């Protein structure tokens, strides 16, 4: 139990950081550049801890800590290849709510500075979240209704008997919809409106330097890990450590491909997209899950 | 006996306060605080007691009786606690306003009436206390005059419609069962026909639906919350509106009885599912309308409607878990919204009455306590883990999902996202971002405002980490309704279909937080800079001009605004105009010319003659 509690965040950290490195490498290759080495994010994080930074006050410090703590807590509730130390403490509903800590923490932290870019970033992030939450809630409800449980661990174990949810009869529509909104959940292009480096200087992170930026980078790594691992758990049937990791890599690389070739949406375009086909398919998926037993 | 004395203290205290105000305003203030605190202590002492039929009065041959049980204790404790806190909050907030003797008397009177409602054991006292509450609420809503007057009138008209429905229901019950004592009615109603039961439930449903602002009957609420003096907005949102929830519980589960309530078939669907869907609509539409509001109090007011939907949904769904969730949410929501109104009040008090979310901002350093209160309040409204509403919402969601009602659950969950967006706008535009220059010299909120804010903030965390405290009381309530007892412990709820363990969540976040904090300490120390010392990516940022608060969700508004209209309000407005037009027409009969009246009399006499002769003279 204790070993699991310590191991799981470490695994998440390693995989998340690896993803960040891979992200830059693959994007570079698609752009026909050589790209930085895979270990570049680790070097950056260590370097940033030694650099100086500014702080706008207590909430500025507190917010980023809360944000990371929230992400860490989610990781403890989310099964990774069957390892889930806190699975019996509330299930998917708790995760859905714990996921709020990360963006809210960063938003509060940024809020103490008076930088307008931060306010714009927060507003865009919240709008985007509302955009993808509509299909996402429909999808999660379809999954929970079909398997008649709110525990992720049980959902995973049932898929090992009946096959991956994304290919199973009543849930395939939900799976398709989930794939359509996954880029928005991960915040990659065309949905990187909340960070948008060229427009609003990375939005909420604009005031971060030194250790703040290091922690924000770790948070980003955790965010990638959580987003992808949730999808693998709910729709790709989990698996043992190796298979699980392979599935994650597969989903992640698909995400990077989308990221590298698309331009950025405007905020209202993103919401219109998310409330269009993905929401419609998710709604049909839920109807299907309710009617087909 | 004790209940009689308690109510006497409550009502007597209100009137004595008025006359003490004529002697000295300081004495009046102290006495008002003293009375409200005494009531809280007295109610708290009744914990765990259950007694019925203290007869206190004879009324046309019927004895009027009082009773206390876990249901009434739960509501009475909340009423007296919020009452005391808002009286304390009033001390500074109302300073220097006119007619304060009247104000304090009314505040205490509203409290007394609410206590009367929850302790009443027969329908006459219930009705009388209900009316006292409605009328004193009207007087307090329209206290500030000007815009407040139409708001008050809107309230009292709707409230009167509700009262009439209730009065009609009471008469019908008395005619049929020859008793007005609630427990006796409950025994008598078992043999009634199902059509009659629906009739009674619809009549009382209208009354309580209006009071707790269920969706098509909500239109009085936004204006009333906005225009009342802020401490009273807190009382109004905190418990007064929730008297409707108490009424629902009383009539559905005590009078009608649970088994019977679920058996009713209303033709299309089961009666309680119709109510569930009303609750779901009440959740979604108002929370999204709240997003469009720019007045801080109006934004909260729309949440008052929206969160009410969760309570109705939980209560109408009626499983042990759902019912517990609905009742618990009533308490949790009240704590949050009272707290939020108080922090708005503090900001309003210091910023010269400004509540416009487009012109405030950056007050976090100036008013840290109000900020902390607002932060915990919004976290509670959202239902973040470790705040109180998380538990109640979790219970409601879980019931809906496991009982295979995903569309109701969707309404509940998407309502939460509407809440997140609108309350974050509330927090950001009040306290975060750039501080407008005119508010440079704002001082902290006064102590009398800080005390209630701090108490309520700690309550949010306490009930969030140890939800067993209120759940134990609620468990006795639902077992008294005849539901299965829940397996409640101090830190959550265990059941065969899934466990909630808030202690695990709390510990996980605490340990994760401390690990991160240590990591944070290891890094090179950051140096402090002021709020305005910002990085603008090479651009020049003129101070005081880049406050991004107006139109906070502009891109979203473009999409959703056309769909978010208050159709019910428009409909009632149209109804009012039609009615006024009709009355104008009727008024024309009174032409003021004697000739016309003579003509009327002649016509009438002719008619009588015609009737008398039986049409033979035709």
Image (spheres, rainbow, N blue to C red):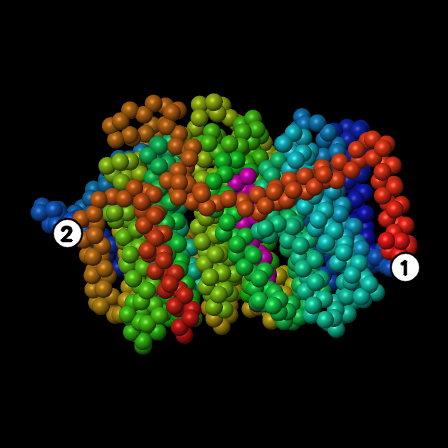
For the N terminus of chain B, the image quarter is: bottom right
Which chain does the residue under circle 2 lie in? A
Where is residue A177? Give x, y as percent: 32, 59
Residue highlighted by disc 2: A26
Q: Is residue B301 magenta?
A: yes
The disc placed on residue B61 is 1
Nearer to the camera, B227 or B514? B227
Would residue B72 be found to the left or right of residue A56 on screen? right
In this rendering, do the residues under marks 2 and 1 share a single chain?
no
Please tell me which residue is depicted at 68% across the width and 46% down the height of the picture: B158
Residue B11 falls in image quadrant: top right
Q: Main secondary structure of the magenta part?
A: helix
Say which chain tag 1 marks: B
- The Cα atoms of the two marked residues, 2 and 1, are separated by 88 Å
Q: Residue at x 80, y 58 (%)?
A: B171
Task: Work out whether B545 lies above or below A161.
Answer: above
Q: Secondary structure at mark 2?
A: helix
Residue farthest front in this picture = B618
Front in this rendered view, residue B1 or B259: B259
Residue A50 appears left or right of A156 = left
* Viewer can see residue A148: yes
Q: Which of the pair B551/A253 is nearer the observer?
A: B551
Q: Given this view, does label 2 or label 1 mark the residue nearer the observer?
A: 1
Which stretch is magenta? B298-320
């Amino acid at each position: 139990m204790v070993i699991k509690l310590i191991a799981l965040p470490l695994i998440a950290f390693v995989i998340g950081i690896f993803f960040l490195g891979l992200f830059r490498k693959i994007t570079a290759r698609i752009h026909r550049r050589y790209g930085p080495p895979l270990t570049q994010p680790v070097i950056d994080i260590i370097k940033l801890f030694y650099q100086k930074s500014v702080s706008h006050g207590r909430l500025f410090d507190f917010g980023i800590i809360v944000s990371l703590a929230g992400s860490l807590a989610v990781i403890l509730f989310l099964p990774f290849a069957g390892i889930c130390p806190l699975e019996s403490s509330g299930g998917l509903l708790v995760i859905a709510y714990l996921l709020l800590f990360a963006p809210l923490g960063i938003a509060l932290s940024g809020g103490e500075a008076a930088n307008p870019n931060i306010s714009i970033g927060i507003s865009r992030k919240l709008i985007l979240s509302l955009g993808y939450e509509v299909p996402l809630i429909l999808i999660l409800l379809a999954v929970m209704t079909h398997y008649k449980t709110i525990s992720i661990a049980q959902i995973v174990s049932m898929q090992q008997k009946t096959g991956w949810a994304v290919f199973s009869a009543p849930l395939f529509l939900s799976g398709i919809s989930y794939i359509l909104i996954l880029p928005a959940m991960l915040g990659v292009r065309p949905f990187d409106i909340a960070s948008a480096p060229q427009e609003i200087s990375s939005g909420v992170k604009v005031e971060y330097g030194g250790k703040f930026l290091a922690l924000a980078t770790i948070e980003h790594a955790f965010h990638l890990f959580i987003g992808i691992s949730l999808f693998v758990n709910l729709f790709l049937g989990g698996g043992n450590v190796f298979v699980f990791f392979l599935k994650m890599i597969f989903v992640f690389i698909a995400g990077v491909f989308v990221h590298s070739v698309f331009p950025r949406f405007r905020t209202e375009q993103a919401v219109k997209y998310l409330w269009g086909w993905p929401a419609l398919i998710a709604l049909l998926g839920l109807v299907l899950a309710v009617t087909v037993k | 006996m004790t209940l009689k004395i308690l109510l006497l203290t409550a009502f007597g205290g209100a009137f004595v306060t008025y006359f003490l105000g004529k002697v000295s305003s300081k004495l009046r203030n102290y006495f008002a605080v003293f009375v409200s605190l005494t009531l809280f202590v007295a109610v708290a002492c009744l914990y765990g007691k259950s007694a019925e039929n203290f007869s206190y009065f004879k009324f046309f041959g019927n004895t009027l009786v009082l009773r206390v049980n876990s249901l009434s204790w739960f509501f009475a404790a909340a009423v007296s606690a919020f009452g005391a806190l808002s009286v304390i909050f009033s001390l500074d907030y109302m300073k220097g306003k006119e007619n304060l003797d009247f104000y304090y008397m009314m505040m205490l009177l509203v409290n007394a009436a609410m206590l009367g409602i929850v302790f009443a054991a027969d329908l006459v006292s219930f009705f009388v206390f209900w009316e006292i509450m409605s009328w004193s609420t009207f007087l307090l809503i329209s206290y500030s005059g000007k815009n407040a007057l139409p708001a008050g009138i809107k309230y009292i008209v709707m409230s009167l419609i509700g009262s009439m429905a209730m009065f009609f229901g009471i008469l019908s019950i008395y005619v049929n069962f020859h008793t007005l004592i609630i427990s006796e009615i409950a025994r008598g109603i078992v043999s009634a026909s199902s059509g009659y039961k629906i009739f009674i439930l619809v009549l009382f449903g209208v009354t309580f639906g209006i009071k707790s602002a269920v969706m098509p009957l909500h239109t009085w609420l936004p204006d009333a919350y906005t225009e009342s003096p802020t401490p009273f907005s807190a009382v109004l949102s905190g418990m007064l509106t929730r008297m409707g929830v108490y009424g629902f519980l009383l009539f559905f589960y005590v009078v009608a009885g649970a088994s019977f309530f679920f058996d009713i078939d209303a033709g299309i669907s089961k009666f309680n599912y119709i109510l569930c869907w009303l609750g779901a609509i009440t959740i979604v539409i108002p929370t999204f309308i709240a997003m469009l509001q720019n007045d801080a109090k109006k934004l909260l007011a729309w949440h008052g409607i929206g969160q009410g939907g969760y309570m109705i949904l939980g209560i109408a769904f009626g499983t042990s878990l759902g019912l517990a969730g609905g009742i618990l949410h009533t308490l949790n929501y009240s704590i949050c919204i009272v707290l939020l109104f108080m922090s708005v009040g503090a900001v309003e008090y210091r910023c010269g009455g400004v509540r416009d979310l487009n012109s405030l901002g950056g007050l976090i350093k100036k008013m840290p306590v109000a900020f902390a209160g607002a932060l915990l309040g919004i976290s509670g409204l959202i239902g973040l883990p470790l705040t109180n509403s998380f538990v109640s919402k979790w219970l409601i969601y879980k019931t809906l999902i496991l009982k295979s009602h995903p569309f109701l659950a969707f309404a509940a969950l998407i309502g939460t996202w509407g809440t997140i967006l609108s309350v974050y706008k509330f927090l950001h535009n009040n306290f975060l971002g750039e501080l407008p220059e005119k508010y440079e010299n704002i001082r902290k909120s006064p102590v009398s405002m800080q005390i209630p804010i701090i108490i309520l903030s700690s309550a949010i965390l306490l009930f969030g980490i140890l939800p067993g405290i209120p759940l134990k009381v609620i468990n006795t309530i639902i077992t008294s309704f005849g539901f299965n007892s829940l397996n409640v412990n101090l830190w959550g709820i265990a059941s065969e279909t899934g466990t909630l363990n808030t202690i695990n969540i709390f510990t996980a976040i605490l340990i994760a937080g401390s690990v991160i904090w240590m990591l944070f300490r290891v890094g090179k120390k950051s140096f402090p800079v002021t709020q305005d010392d910002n990085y603008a990516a090479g651009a020049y940022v003129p101070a005081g001009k880049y406050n991004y608060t107006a139109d906070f969700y502009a891109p979203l508004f473009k999409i959703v605004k056309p769909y978010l209209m208050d159709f019910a309000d428009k409909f009632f407005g149209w109804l009012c105009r039609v009615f006024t037009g009709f009355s104008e027409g009727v008024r024309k009969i009174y032409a003021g010319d004697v000739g016309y009246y003579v003509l009327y009399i002649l016509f009438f006499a002719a008619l009588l003659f015609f009737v008398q002769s039986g049409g033979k003279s035709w």
